[in-house]
Image: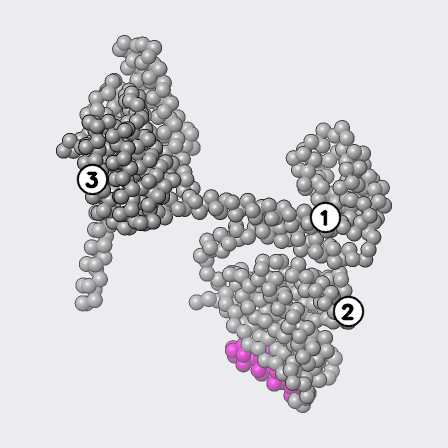
Amino acid sequence: MSSHTRIYPYQRQTGNTITATGLSIDLLFLMAVFFLSRATLLAELYPFGSSIIIAIGSRRQRILWPVVLAVMLSTWFTNPNSVYSRLLVFLILGLAYTFYPSWRQRSSLIQATLVPMAIILIRGIDLTLGQPSFYSWVEIVFESIMSWGLSLAFLEVSDSKRQEERLLGSGLFFLGVLLGLQGFKIAGFSLQGLVSRYILLLASLTGGPGIGAAVGTALGFIPSLSQMATPSLAGLMAFSGLIAGSLKSLGKPGVIGGYLLSHLVLANYFLGPNNVLLVLKESVIVVLSLLITPPSLTNYLSEFLSQTTKQQLETTDSSKQEKLSEVLKSLARHLKYSGYNESPQTVIRQVARIVCNGCPAAKVCWQLEGEQMLTTLQELLNSSQGKLTSNDIPEWLSSRCTRCRELLAALTTQANKFKVQSVEDGLNSWLANTFEILGSMVTQESSRVEQNKDNRKKPSLKVSVGIAAVPRHQADITGDAFSIAPIAPDKHLLVLGDGMGVGRKAANESGTAIEMLQDLLDAGFSPEFALRTVNMILLLRSSQESYTTLDIALLNCFTGTAYFYKLGACPSFIHRNGSINILRSHSLPVGILEDLQLEPLREELQDGDLLVMVSDGILEAHRDINEKEKWLAKALQRVGEARPQEIADRLLKQASALVSGKPLDDMTVVVARVEKVG
């Protein structure tokens, strides 16, 4: 009971605090809207009021009518020309979003177009009934165009996630607010001048000399936007922002010192002796305001401004990645055909002259999709040792090309100019594929990282593993090797290898193969390419015969899908609800032949499944060749709900008993149980 009395009042207090905070923000926003709506351009145009109604009506329906009332009150007290027609425009815009809520689902362009339509219609009728003049019509047209542009900008920026666009939208909003402060004074000081100088100091403190100078220039031109005046203040503000921002590293004292120094030096020159004292008094007030500014605000602004620079650096890095990708793919293309007696580009140009000359689609094929066309024809040329058929042409090309027969005939005819010179083409092809895959991975890496960051979903399955192993009789080390490791947020790797021979040499062979395989999978390569790479490395590293069997299981812990690659490996066993499923494959081990045949097996694993992988020493423990798999399947049916490690130990013990404790080969058992998370 006492604990409840402590918890509930605290929750209510938090809710009230949040509500009060939200209400305070709304009131500050409405105050800003009030000043924004009285902002004028060239002393006669008022485009901000209608544009802010459109933006709020589309994005924040909750405060639509408070904003409409704030805009109408501001316009009433400002008392511009045709005040009643302006108030009617604001009212119609508010009613449009109230009675037609589906309007908010339209595109930004269509919603923004509502503003000039309302202004021209309402104010045009008012002008026609009053005293029409050409100048008044020009004023209406210009105000409607500016209102349309501001409405479109506010709508687009409100949905944007790019920092520079959000910065632009905030700048337009505060520009209007500063323009609306024109003429307001507090104790004889210009409110517009005080706010402008405070923003300048804040920008210099958070953004440095570049931001300070840019903001100072913009702020210096603001008075000349609303009235016909020379923008003499722009030079002083820009110089002050530059000097103050240059001393950003010294913190607030440095920024304040630089700002005051620049004003003392140049205020008399830019503003004249009559205004110097007033400006210096305003500067003192602004300096005091900066001193009491909380660090949290300056830290937030610094982070906000730095994100734009960070995005630009990321764009540069992306450009470098694209160039690196192009270089790698170019190396792949040239390396793939480096063993031929004539350049593939030469042969393909000859084919293009014969076949594509005069074809209507030639411009699309060779100018718009030249890279893809070149790569496709090179691949066809490489495979054209016999006669090419229509099935060899990709669908995207065959559906467009009206001269497929001529293309196939020309490629077959020219193939005799493109013959292999050396026996190293297998190595060249592998290296070329490596460069090609690396080029694709470079451009995909950033998006893959972002997807991993955004992936908040937890895996639905977990894997618990048990391992038991024993070397052959009178051997000090087993030649089998194994690895169990996660290789991605959604994948789990189980691999068992058996090197050629026994002892340390076999252990080195199998361990090296598994280590390379795991590193390649960790780097993001596909299992097929990783296995071909391991196979090529084993072929190249030694002139003597050297091979390793690999039994691989790749488990997706999100979907339950598992892929099995069995290269010279023993069958694997899946125990599910008392039944045994045996997985077999007849591929050769890695390190024997250059052309590696891969036939992955796919299985959908379920909660409670037991996966068992064994080396050949386990199966060959039974002397009867017909019982090699049966005895292990029967043993698995008796394991019950034991832990994977207990099952692995039990199976190894039974296999050892079959050979009287003297294994003729290394024995390894890997047992994995798949279970639901939670």
The residue type indicated by label 3 comes to: Val
Is residue 435 or residue 111 the one in the foreground? 435
Q: Does the rendering let one see residue 17?
A: yes
Upstream in sequence: badge 2 or badge 3:
3
x and y percentages locating residue 551 in the rendered image: 65, 69
- Identify the residue at image location x=82%, y=39%: 410
Q: Secondary structure at mark 1?
A: helix
Label 3 close to label 1 by CB (< 8 Å): no
Q: Is residue 644 magenta?
A: yes
Q: Does the rendering let one see residue 404?
A: no
Upstream in sequence: badge 3 or badge 1:
3
x and y percentages locating residue 631 in the rendered image: 66, 80
Residue denoted by label 3: 284
Residue denoted by label 2: 543
Q: Secondary structure at mark 3?
A: helix
Q: Is residue 184 left or right of residue 347?
A: left
Residue stretch in magenta: 636-659
Q: Which mark is residue 334?
A: 1
Which residue in the rendered view is the most extreme toward the bottom?
A: 660
x and y percentages locating residue 613 in the rendered image: 62, 73
Q: Secondary structure at mark 2?
A: loop
- Identify the residue at image location x=77%, y=71%: 545
Position above or below: 95 against 379: above
C-alpha distance separating marks 2 and 3? 84 Å
